[in-house]
């Protein structure tokens, strides 16, 4: 694998620890956490998946939505302070496009819908769509024209495609397709992300790797992007994923490799070459602990205060101990860009 560019003096104190197993032994770039959210106080697997909402009129007022899969949806500001809690039940994953967010709700076996008011900076729950299928697990959102897509994923390897016109939300979404994506191992799916610019959707099969679907043809067979066996950095579980979007469809896919405490970066455009691997280590002042066993993540390329080239938000399994006071860490994309030599 390529050698990484130095991150100047601010990263000298950071170091990465690699597990001893050969499958795990791969060079990683250490990236310090910049901000952490308020903890979901207590023991147990609570925090799961974040989504970043950018306030276009006032980027400093942007929000981070985060699921507590035992309770509901939390809302934080960019300083990590808790602003809201929505008691909507056991929501596992969350994603958004524009001012509309969706979450997979395995308490009600539904897709939960939320709107974000850019004037008041508040999130409101507006209803649920029954999926007629047990335990929606992951979810991702897409927007093509005025068609809003919600794709819940399931532990039997199925992904559903729901769609609704943004000017007809009250009519409710229509189920367009059910796709058997998972094909190996335990079949279980969770993470997924729409890449509207290139007409594709990426989906993770936890015990196998990353697939992509054709956004313009839901009947097309899934295409393999990377596998655990290829040893580019993925290990089970393949978890959260999202996109740093550049111009003209360029950009990068970021995937959580949960058991190895690391993240694999790929070119967004085919053939989706692996570009490197990073870990999230403690902040330079030691006030924020390192990230372990990440489940969900979110990426946004919009310039934000303190994050001039965009932001990565990742779930942290332990704060600092595993299964204790879980929260989300915010990371500056600029440091990842420099470390991996990205354009």
Image (cartoon, rainbow, N blue to C red):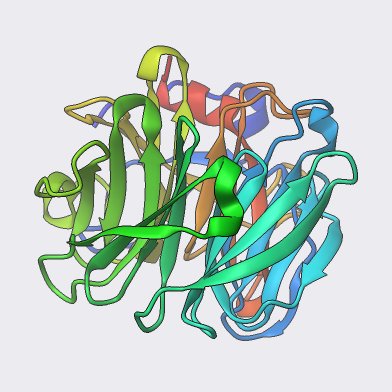
User: Could you tell me residue 173's position as x and y percent?
Assistant: 46, 58
Q: Which residue sits at x=76%, y=60%? A: 124
Residue 119 versus residue 182: which sits nearer the camera? 119
Residue 91 versus residue 172: which sits nearer the camera? 172
User: Could you tell me residue 125's position as x and y percent?
Assistant: 71, 65
In the rendered image of this protein, does residue 294 appear above or below residue 26? below
| Quadrant of the image containing the N terminus | top left
Q: Which residue sits at x=52%, y=63%? A: 292
Residue 256 visible to the viewer: no
Question: Residue 7's quadrant in the figure?
Answer: top right
User: Could you tell me residue 310's position as x and y percent?
Assistant: 62, 29
Residue 72 visible to the viewer: yes
Question: Residue 191's quadrant in the figure?
Answer: bottom left
User: In the picture provided, is 47 more to the left or to the right than 258?
Assistant: right
User: Could you tell me residue 183's position as x and y percent?
Assistant: 11, 65
Q: How many marks?
A: 0
Question: Residue 150's quadrant in the figure?
Answer: bottom left
| Quadrant of the image containing the C terminus | top left
Q: Which residue sits at x=85%, y=46%? A: 121
In the rendered image of this protein, does residue 207 appear above or below residue 297? below
In the rendered image of this protein, does residue 38 appear above or below residue 334? below
């Amino acid at each position: 694998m390529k050698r990484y560019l130095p991150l100047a003096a601010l990263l000298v104190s950071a170091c990465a620890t690699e597990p001893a197993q050969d499958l795990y032994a791969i060079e990683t770039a250490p990236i310090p956490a910049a901000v952490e959210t308020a903890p979901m106080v207590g023991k147990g697997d609570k925090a799961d998946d974040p989504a970043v909402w950018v306030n276009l009129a006032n980027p400093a007022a942007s929000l981070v939505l985060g699921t507590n899969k035992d309770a509901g949806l939390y809302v934080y500001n960019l300083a990590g302070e808790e602003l809201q809690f929505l008691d909507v039940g056991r929501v596992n994953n969350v994603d958004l496009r524009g001012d509309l967010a969706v979450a997979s709700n395995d308490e009600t076996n539904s897709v939960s819908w939320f709107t974000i008011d850019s004037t008041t900076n508040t999130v409101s729950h507006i209803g649920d769509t029954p999926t007629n299928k047990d335990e929606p697990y992951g979810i991702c959102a897409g927007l093509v024209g005025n068609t809003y897509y919600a794709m819940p994923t399931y532990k039997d390897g199925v992904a559903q495609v729901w769609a609704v016109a943004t000017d007809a939300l009250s009519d409710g979404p229509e189920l367009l397709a059910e796709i058997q994506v998972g094909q190996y191992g335990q079949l279980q799916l969770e993470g997924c992300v729409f890449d509207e610019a290139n007409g594709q959707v990426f989906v993770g099969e936890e015990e196998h790797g990353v697939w992509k679907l054709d956004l313009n043809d839901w009947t097309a067979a899934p295409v393999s992007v990377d596998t655990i066996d290829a040893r580019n950095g993925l290990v089970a579980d393949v978890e959260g994923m999202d996109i740093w979007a550049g111009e003209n469809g360029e950009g990068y896919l970021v995937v959580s490799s949960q058991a190895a405490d690391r993240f694999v970066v790929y070119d967004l455009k085919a053939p989706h070459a692996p570009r490197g691997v990073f870990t999230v280590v403690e902040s330079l002042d030691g006030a924020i602990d390192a990230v372990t066993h990440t489940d969900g993540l979110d990426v946004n390329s919009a310039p934000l205060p303190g994050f001039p080239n965009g932001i990565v938000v990742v779930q942290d399994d332990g704060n600092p101990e595993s299964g204790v006071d879980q929260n989300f860490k915010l990371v500056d994309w600029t440091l990842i860009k420099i470390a991996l030599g990205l354009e």
